């Protein structure tokens, strides 16, 4: 088997442990431990299995949940959109026909696939995790090798429990020191993407390291790994430590008893060796990171909240300059405008990036005792799962949001991509805790600014972007 | 899978970098449970002036005459030209299905996002990587003459401007072989079924918690 015996990175270790067959050209047949499925990218894969008369290789590896299309209100009345309903029905039928475990729409465990995997302990350290969704990189927070795949690969995994993969290069992003108060995991990852660019991680697996990453909770690490794909890398990961192990312990799919003890021993080795070689290293000083806001139509188009919309005229590269000009036109923004002068129409707090309980707590802490500005047409909070929603309600967060004028919804992907009824209308501007500010992402003609949950809540109250640290300062 | 060997045709110049898969095929079309029929919705937000969805007849919609795909001189093109980081964003394979269903057989750009790149090969659709200055020469050739014929020769790993320059491109030997032969990758992997079972047996010993029911 290929692979170095010493001086290996975390990614090298995960890769080596999953090689079924090395093809000798940098690619290998890689075993897949966990396969998560949702309704959008799986129907054609199941159809492919049927056409070829193939069966899933190992049923217990699969876990399915509907999330992209699901309505976030009035669920008991069923799904109004017949096309969305057909896709959810297809997931139900396929999972029933092939005996795949599924959390249905009315199951309290239903939620965004990248929220429920970790929540259930279905994502474990040392696993290979795949899903037909690019934000599968989220699960790398557990010291797992987690990658998004296309539908043909979904079918391949179902049929063979493997994927033909080309080994990526190793990139370590070290966030040195500690971030200041009011600066979150979302700001860290947006700052990283702003630094290395939206294609900066292409061809690499990224390991996030440094004190600022170690200091993050598992939920914060998931937020960082979630947006790895926005930096172009298919996989992002964080080494296992006590934070990881404490989070996993006792979750429904996690091992127990003697199996737990054995697993913990194995997981303790899931870190890069001190003498491991990285093909590329990037170091960022945590102290320099401020709350971030995107201004354009790519996640790399990001500035600190105290900054201004950049001027394309100052960009030397012609292709980049054209991209900036087009982005400003689409976003209806003028170069030089202070970010805090930008007013919003809608607020979205949710998505696989930022819809976990700590995200909701952070947003609620800002919203408490305030009210959404009169100029905001809609402010939505969409929990990442039914269990996140239950927990939030137990803590009274729903009440805080409702009192402040936010809508409190049922779990799902919602306005991150607007496949369900939640979306932006043409020209509407949104402060969103999601992961993509592409043209039309949240609705045709919609304008998205990516921010942290606390920054989104602050923008909802002010009606425009505001440095959340000022509001937090007032409250203290 | 449709094999890919050599194609000759005209090209559509899409002069943008970071073309994301949301732009290639917007979300409302991902509700389809089929692999086919996405061609009319390719670049939907740019291509039409009015909104659409799966239930709207495209014939009733207003095409955007300024969008490059709608210009009469680019009808029937089989090659798409673009800039760096083509296909970034979502893993939706629908992006490749839409490009192929529209009639494109290949895209030429200076770089691609990883997931789009690997999805392409599963669908007989070739993403060619050329150097940025070579891509620029192709843009110039097409700007000078929209009817300029271009050949993408996979066996020879070459892009040729008919009557002009030729550019070499690199590609993984295994990927090239699979594409030229139109291999069923799942069938190919199942030929290693014994190796997969042997791996599982070893792994079950070392990490039994991964195989819990």
Image (cartoon, rainbow, N blue to C red):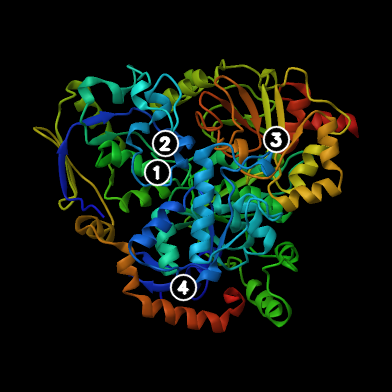
**Looking at the image, is mark 4 or mark 3 earlier in the sequence?**
4
- Bin the neighbour count of mark 1 within 10 Å (Cα to Cα): few under 14, some 14-19, many 20 and up: many
Q: Residues within 10 Å of mark 3 (few under 14, many from 20)?
A: many
> Which residue does the numbered mark 1 point to in the structure image?
B94
- In the picture of the structure, the residue carrying the numbered disc 2 is B25
Note whether A8 is above or below A288 in the view shown: below
Q: Is residue B210 left or right of residue A476?
A: left
**Which residue in the structure is indicated by mark 4?**
A4
Q: Chain of mark 2?
A: B
The lab-note entry on whether marks 3 and 1 share a chain reads no
Q: Is residue B117 above or below residue A277?
A: above
Seen in the image, is A183 located left or right of residue A12? right
> Please, what secondary structure does the residue beneath circle 2 have?
loop
Chain under numbered label 3: A
Residue at 60% over, 74% down: B213
The image shows residue A247 at horizontal and vertical percentages of 73, 62
Asked which quadrant contains residue B162, the reply is: top left
Kindly identify which residue carries mark 3. A290
Residue A457 visible in this rendered orientation of the protein = yes
* Tally of marks: 4
Give the chain letter at badge 4. Answer: A
Q: Report whether mark 1 lies on the same chain as mark 4.
A: no
Q: Quadrant of residue A152?
A: bottom left
């Amino acid at each position: 088997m290929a692979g170095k015996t010493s001086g290996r990175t975390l990614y090298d270790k995960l890769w080596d442990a999953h090689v079924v067959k090395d093809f000798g050209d940098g690619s290998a047949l890689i075993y897949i431990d966990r396969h998560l499925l949702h309704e959008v990218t799986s129907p054609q894969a199941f159809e492919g299995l049927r056409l070829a008369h193939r069966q899933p290789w190992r049923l217990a590896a699969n876990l399915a949940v509907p999330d992209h299309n699901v309505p976030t209100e009035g669920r008991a009345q069923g799904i109004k959109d017949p096309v969305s309903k057909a896709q959810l029905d297809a997931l139900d039928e396929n999972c029933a026909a092939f005996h795949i475990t599924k959390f249905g729409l009315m199951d309290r465990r239903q939620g965004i696939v990248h929220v429920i995997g970790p929540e259930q302990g279905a994502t474990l350290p040392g696993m290979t995790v795949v899903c037909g969704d690019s934000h599968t990189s989220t699960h790398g927070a557990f010291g797992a090798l987690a990658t998004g795949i296309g539908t043909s690969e979904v079918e391949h995994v179902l049929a063979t429990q493997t994927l033909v993969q080309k080994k990526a290069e190793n990139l370590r992003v070290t966030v040195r020191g500690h971030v200041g108060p009011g600066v979150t995991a979302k700001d860290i990852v947006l700052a990283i993407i702003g630094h290395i660019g939206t294609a900066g991680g292409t061809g690499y697996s990224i390991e996030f390291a440094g004190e600022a990453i170690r200091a993050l909770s598992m939920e914060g690490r998931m937020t960082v790994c979630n947006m790895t794909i926005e930096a172009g890398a298919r996989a992002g990961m964080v080494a296992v430590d006590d934070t990881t192990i404490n989070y996993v312990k006792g979750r429904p799919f996690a091992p127990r008893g003697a199996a737990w003890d054995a697993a913990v021993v194995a997981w303790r080795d899931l870190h890069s060796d001190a003498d491991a070689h990285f093909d590329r290293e990037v170091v960022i000083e945590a102290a320099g990171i401020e709350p971030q806001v995107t201004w354009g139509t790519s996640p790399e188009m990001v500035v600190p909240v105290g900054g201004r919309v950049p001027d394309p005229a100052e960009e030397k590269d012609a292709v980049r300059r054209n991209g900036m000009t087009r982005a400003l036109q689409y976003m209806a923004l003028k170069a030089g405008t202070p970010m805090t002068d930008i007013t919003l129409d809608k607020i979205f707090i949710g998505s696989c990036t930022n819809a976990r309980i700590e995200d909701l707590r952070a947003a609620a802490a800002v919203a408490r005792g305030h009210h959404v500005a009169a100029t905001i047409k809609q402010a939505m909070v969409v929990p990442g799962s039914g269990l996140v929603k239950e927990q939030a309600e137990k803590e009274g967060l729903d009440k805080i949001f409702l009192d402040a004028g936010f809508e409190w919804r049922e779990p799902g992907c919602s306005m991150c991509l607007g496949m369900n009824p939640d979306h932006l209308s043409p020209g509407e501007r949104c402060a969103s805790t999601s992961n993509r500010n592409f043209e039309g992402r949240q609705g045709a003609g919609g304008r998205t600014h990516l921010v942290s949950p606390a920054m989104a809540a602050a923008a909802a109250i002010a009606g425009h972007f505001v440095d959340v640290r000022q509001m937090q300062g007032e409250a203290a | 899978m449709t094999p890919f060997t050599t194609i000759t045709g005209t090209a559509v110049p899409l002069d943008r970098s970071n073309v994301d898969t949301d732009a290639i095929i917007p979300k409302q079309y991902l509700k389809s449970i089929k692999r086919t029929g996405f061609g009319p919705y390719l670049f939907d937000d740019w291509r039409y002036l009015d909104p659409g969805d799966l239930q709207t007849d495209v014939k009733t919609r207003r095409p955007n005459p300024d969008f490059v795909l709608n210009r009469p001189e680019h009808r029937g093109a089989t090659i798409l030209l673009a800039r760096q980081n083509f296909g970034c964003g979502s893993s939706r394979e629908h992006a490749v299905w839409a490009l192929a269903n529209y009639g494109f057989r290949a895209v030429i750009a200076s770089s691609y996002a990883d997931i789009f790149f690997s999805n392409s090969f599963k669908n007989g659709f070739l993403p060619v990587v050329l150097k940025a200055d070579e891509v620029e020469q192709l843009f110039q050739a097409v700007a000078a003459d929209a009817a300029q014929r271009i050949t993408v020769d996979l066996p020879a790993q070459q892009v040729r401007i008919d009557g002009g320059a030729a550019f070499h491109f690199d590609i993984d030997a295994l990927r090239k072989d699979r594409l030229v032969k139109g291999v069923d990758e799942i069938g190919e992997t199942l030929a290693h079924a014994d190796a997969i079972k042997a791996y599982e047996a070893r792994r079950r010993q070392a990490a039994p918690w991964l195989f819990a029911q």
